Image (cartoon, grey):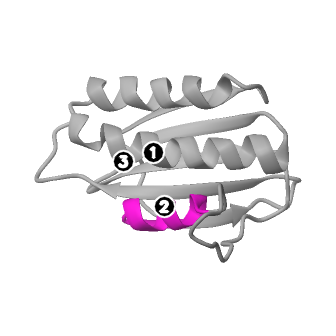
Amino acid sequence: MAGNAPFWSHQATFEASLISASQARRFVSRHLIEHRLSYLVDPVRLVMSELATNSLVHAQTAFTTTLAGLDETVLLTVRDGSLALPTRRATQTLDAGGRGLEIVDIVSLEWGINEDGAGSKAVWASFAIRGPREF
């Protein structure tokens, strides 16, 4: 997702530990509420959880989360220290996992992956802001 400069932006880095996903969910919740976007808390928390889990399970590195308010969207970005790109998996009904990117696709407005060529990647997802906003 390229383009507009954010009206506001918050960033935090989380260790590769068991509690990091819950810390990241609290981080996005707090800032969405701070910017009077409480209706986005549930979908952004869900996507945050999926992207944090992907970083923890697959990259096994610390990850940096950025939450930014743009003109008509909120942009969530999770950057980790792995070049391995996330891929969708075909899942069966009783599979315990493998649905993370499908959830991201369903819940977000759009999503994608940016590679930086310096040993990391960023997965981002955007969410529509309702009506005109004053940041």
Judge the density around disc 2: few (<14), some (14-19), many (≥20) Cα neighbours within 10 Å.
some
* Mark 3 surroundings: few (<14), some (14-19) or many (≥20) residues within 10 A: some
Query: Height in image: 59 above or below 17?
Result: below
Disc 3 to disc 1: CB gap under 8 Å: yes
The Cα atoms of the two marked residues, 1 and 2, are separated by 8 Å
Distance CA(mark 3)–CA(mark 1): 5 Å
Badge 2 marks a residue whose secondary structure is helix
Q: Is residue 100 magenta?
A: yes
In this orientation, which residue lies closer to the viewer: 106 or 67?
A: 106
The amino acid at mark 3 is: Pro
Label for residue 37? none
Which residues are drawn in magenta? Answer: 99-111
Q: Is residue 113 visible?
A: yes
- Image position of 4 (left or right of 134): right
The amino acid type found where label 1 is placed reads Leu
- Give coordinates of residue 60: x percent, y percent: 85, 41
The residue under the point 67% across, 63% down is 114
Which residue was labeled with disc 1?
46
Tell whether label 2 touches label 1 (CB within 8 Å): yes
Q: Residue furthest bottom?
A: 90
As drawn, which residue projects farthest toward the left? 131
Side (left or right) of 6 relative to 15: left
The image position of residue 125, as x and y in percent, is 48, 57
Residue under circle 2? Answer: 103
Name the mark on residue 43. Answer: 3
- Give amino acid for label 2: Ile
Q: Earlier in the sequence, mark 1 or mark 2?
A: 1
